[in-house]
Amino acid sequence: MPFQKVTPEKLSTSVIRQIEQLILRGILRPGERLPAERELAERLGVSRPSLREAISEMQERGLLASKAGAGVFVAEVLGNAFSPAIIKLFAEHEEAVFDYISFRQDMEGLAAERAAKFASDTDLQVIDAVFKKMEAANPKRNPTDEARLDADFHLAIIEASHNVIMLHMMRSMYDLLREGVFYNRIAMFKQRTTRSDLLDQHRRINDALQARDPKAARAAVQDHLKYVEQSLHDHSKSLRNEVVAKQRYEHEIGRD
């Protein structure tokens, strides 16, 4: 008979399992500091030796990392999704920008559809709260806060889709976007007309999600990203036209 004796699970194994789930579900994020040892042991209801054993094993597996005098942190595991060489290649080639937006249309459209179906009421409250912060940031002259909240809004939708593979993959992609690898989001938000259009687009996404309308949510996300794509095409064309205009100007001045 295929039965084995049941053995009690070690406390350190239970600790590992809980921390693993928090990392897997995206609740504990790369670079996030764990509570101090005494506090964490009390929260988990385990002895400090059991906690140390769990943390040591997770460090060996590359999920946690300790910094002298600073504590224990979730390892920057997402930073390994792309090598430095390929990141540099992305940044230098416009083709990667538009491939990235196309990829986002597919993935985030699916995420929005899933979020409309599977998000909890709390998930939708988080999305709505981020959108309200975007509304509050919109009148500010400096677009930095609104651009940051734009990324937070999209990631909140991905989190609400409750697909852990999509979550970690897209977080890695958004880290590169925040760093300006694919395109400069701040530059897009500097234009008042663009900022107004973008806010309206995010409002439509939020409204569809709050109404739990999967089809409308997916369409709103894809329409928004098509707008982003067209805006970047127009910006790129404008830059090329300016290069030609300067050449004409220099040639004309040189004829005097």
Image: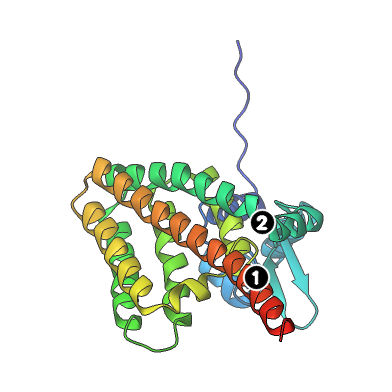
Side (left or right) of 48 relative to 164: right
Q: Nearer the viewer, residue 64 or 145?
A: 145
Q: Earlier in the sequence, mark 2 or mark 1?
A: 2
Name the image quarter holding the C terminus: bottom right
- Residue drawn at the location 56% of the way across and 62% of the way down: 236
Q: Height in image: 136 above or below 53?
A: below
Question: Dot 2 lies on which element?
Answer: helix
Q: In the depicted view, which residue is nearer to us: 129 or 120?
A: 129
Using a 10 Å C-alpha cutoff, classify the residue at mark 2 as few (fewer than 14 neighbours), some (14 to 19) or many (20 or more).
Answer: some
Instruction: Please give the label number shown on residue 243.
Output: 1
Residue 88, image quadrant: bottom right
Q: Pointer 1: residues within 10 angstroms few (<14), some, or many (20+)? A: few
Q: Up-down: is 187 above or below 86? A: below
Residue 83: image x %, image y %?
Answer: 78, 53
Residue furthest out toward the top = 1
Name, please, the residue furthest toward the left.
211
Colouring method of the image: rainbow
Q: Residue at x 35, y 70 (%)?
A: 130
Image coordinates of residue 150 in percent, x first then y, are: 42, 68
> In this orientation, does residue 120 appear?
yes
114 up-or-down from 190: above or below: above
Image location (x, y in percent) of residue 57: 76, 54
Q: Quadrant of residue 29?
A: bottom right
Residue type, mark 1 in image: Val
The label number, if any, that marks residue 11 in the structure image: none
Q: Quadrant of residue 184?
A: bottom right
In the displayed structure image, the side of residue 224 where residue 241 appears, left or right: right
* Extreme-bottom residue of the structure: 141
Q: Which residue is mark 2?
A: 78
Residue occupying the point 37% across, 71% down = 194
Q: In front here: 95 or 75?
A: 95
Instruction: Please indicate whether residue 243 sits to the left or right of residue 228 in the image.
Output: right
